[in-house]
Image: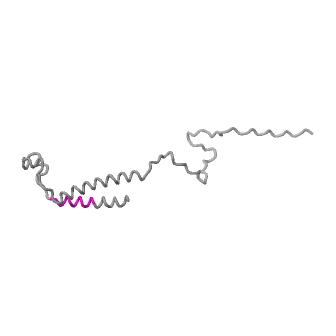
Amino acid sequence: MYTFLFVLLILDALVLVAAILLQSGKGGGLAASFGGASSAAESVIGSRQAGNLLTKTSWWAGGIFIGLSFILQLAGSRSRAPESVLDRSFGTAPAAAPPQPAQGAAPQGAAPAVPATPAAPTPAPAAPAPK
């Protein structure tokens, strides 16, 4: 459905561009608003003429474009649920152990390794029995 609406949006954009580019210029442009070409009331407010086919097409295509854009924005945001980084589970430990540093060489600034639990006391070797 999303792809179909997106294709419609692209086709509507092409119709809108064609309808706008094929319209004849009204003359004056921005300069007419400031009295450059003609200061008649029609040039400030705009002439009151019946809209021809291209004018109606551009208005309809613009409205459809805005409507389709809004629908696609809603459809695109609802397809993906927000996901937190904290919800992701951590992967299992790597199969191979990381390389061990050379014996006696500790990384700079590293504290000496201390076991998390104290080692169990080893029994003292038995003294040989006197003869």
67 left or right, relative to 38: right
Was residue 10 drawn as part of the magenta stretch in this picture? no
What's the residue at 47%, 46% (across, down)?
A: 84
Question: Based on the displayed image, in which of its 4 quarters is residue 11 positioned?
Answer: bottom left
What's the residue at 14%, 49% (across, down)?
A: 30
Which residue appears farthest toward the right when viewing the image?
Answer: 131
Q: Position of residue 25 (x, y in %)?
A: 13, 56
64 left or right, relative to 91: left
In this rendered view, identify the residue nearer to me: 118 or 82.
82
Which residue appears farthest toward the front when viewing the image?
Answer: 50
What's the residue at 24%, 61% (across, down)?
A: 15
Q: Position of residue 114 (x, y in %)?
A: 64, 39
The overriding secondary structure of the stretch rendered in magenta is: helix
Say above or below: 58 vs 44.
below
Q: Quadrant of the N terminus?
A: bottom left
Which contiguous range is marked in magenta? 12-23
What's the residue at 46%, 48% (across, down)?
A: 83
Say above or below: 21 vs 39.
below
Was residue 13 drawn as part of the magenta stretch in this picture? yes
In this rendered view, identify the residue nearer to me: 55 or 33.
55
Q: Position of residue 86 (x, y in %)?
A: 50, 45
111 left or right, relative to 87: right
